[in-house]
Image (cartoon, rainbow, N blue to C red):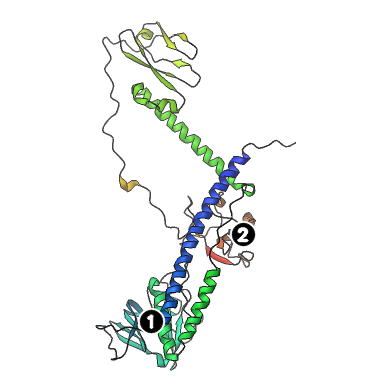
Amino acid sequence: MATRDVRRPDWRARWAERENERRRRAHDADAESWRRRADELARLRAEVDCFHGYHEPGLPVDLEDDEVVFRVLPAAELVEATARHLAGLPAPGLAVTPLPADAPGRALPRGLRVTDAGLAVVTDRRVAFAGPRGQRHWWYADLTGPAHHAQAPVTLLHTIHGGKLAGLRVPPESALNFRFYLTLAFADVLGDRDVVAAYLDEQITAHEQARPAVPDPADADVAPQIALLHDRRIAVGAAAVAMLVTATTVGIVGHGRPASELNGQASAIGAVSTVAPTASGAAATTSAGPGGEVTPPPSREAAAGGSTVVAGATGGVVAPVRPSPTPTVSGDPQPQPTSSGPQTSPSPSAAPTEIDRCGAPPNPYGYNYCGGALIHQPAADVCSYFPCMADFLSGSGHLVTCRDGLIGLVGGQPDECADHRGIRRTVYA
């Protein structure tokens, strides 16, 4: 019969505890992101029913007397296409598409270039841009519709007259509002405000169905073997720290600190300090190890070839001591200083800072979703910090996170995350 591994329940239980904490943090982050999106959709849906523009005097764009403002963006950029026909650019429509959470920020899509920077105004009749190089106007009557890019805060404005394609790039945090109010204003001209309302109703329903579910608790019986290696590394590190503390405490005692100043410190490492008086009235420090054996330091009697009586675990024990080569000193010994100078506290600047991982679980290797190098050979205990696929070690690509939350070495492969609802994002080092 196989020998039972007594360590098995411990390391598996510790893995389950860490895994449950990781799942809780991931669920909290997903739930917070879900709530923010739900609030945005509810606000936009309410605007469809009640918002009809406002008057804004003092703009650098001359508005008509009855023209009302839907949105003002103080920081916008005029972009133009470098060619007449470009592949991969969005088509015009009335969909209000938000930027995904992992969008590359202000990156400009290929085939576009910035030609000016200034202020943009969305009214009930046009989109106007005013910059150092002049003004640009897109009247809704001349537009086929706004085209919002799926991965960049860029909206292209297609005109019925053709010509060079142009549009605006806005700050990522303003993209959703800009797209909504521009789409709403253009829909009003077409008499299709109800189309925008229906689109938002569909988005609200789909978002409600995508509410993050509370994760199931981790089962200790399915703990991966790689967690055992991680557990042993922690045990080795703890043993090294304990040895360092022991050596440091013994070193303090050996440098002349009285045992009375070490109340509780020596007992924390399995030793008890006692003070035995010498013939001249001076105090000599002795220490008792875990087994009760007491080893006194050299005293004046020892220097003279005598014996020292110390208290052991079972009674008095006479321990002969060899003569010390240290010369005897007349009079009471001078007390030694307990410290070499004033103690200083560490500077606040030395405190560690939290690293931005763009939503990746905390880990000691700097793995993140922000950017960096692709990971083809992850750390051996990566599954202690990220949830791994069952066939994690059989992958041959780089490290990615699939849409079901599991990671695997399948990035760059033809069937990457094929069994896990597709790829969600790349894990970087």
CA gap between label 1 and label 2 equals 53 Å
Secondary structure, mark 2, is: loop
- Nearer to me, 351 or 193: 193
Q: Earlier in the sequence, mark 1 or mark 2?
A: 1
Q: Which residue is mark 1?
A: 51
Q: Which residue is mark 2?
A: 396
Give the total number of marks visible in the rendering: 2
Q: Position of residue 94 (x, y in %)?
A: 48, 83
Above-or-below relation of 323 to 356: above
- Nearer to me, 273 or 118: 273
Above-or-below relation of 20 to 113: above
Secondary structure, mark 1, is: loop
Residue 80 position by quadrant? bottom left
- Nearer to me, 210 or 152: 210
Above-or-below relation of 185 to 382: below
Q: Position of residue 344 (x, y in %)?
A: 28, 37
- Furthest-right residue in this view: 1
Neighbourhood count class around disc 2 (C-alpha, 10 Å): few under 14, some 14–19, many 20 upward: some
Residue 215 position by quadrant? bottom right
Left/right of residue 30 with respect to residue 325 in the rendered view: right
- Furthest-left residue in this view: 58
Q: Amino acid at mark 1?
A: Phe
Left/right of residue 214 with respect to residue 336 in the rendered view: right
Above-or-below relation of 76 to 325: below
Q: Give the label, 1 or 2, closer to the camera.
A: 1
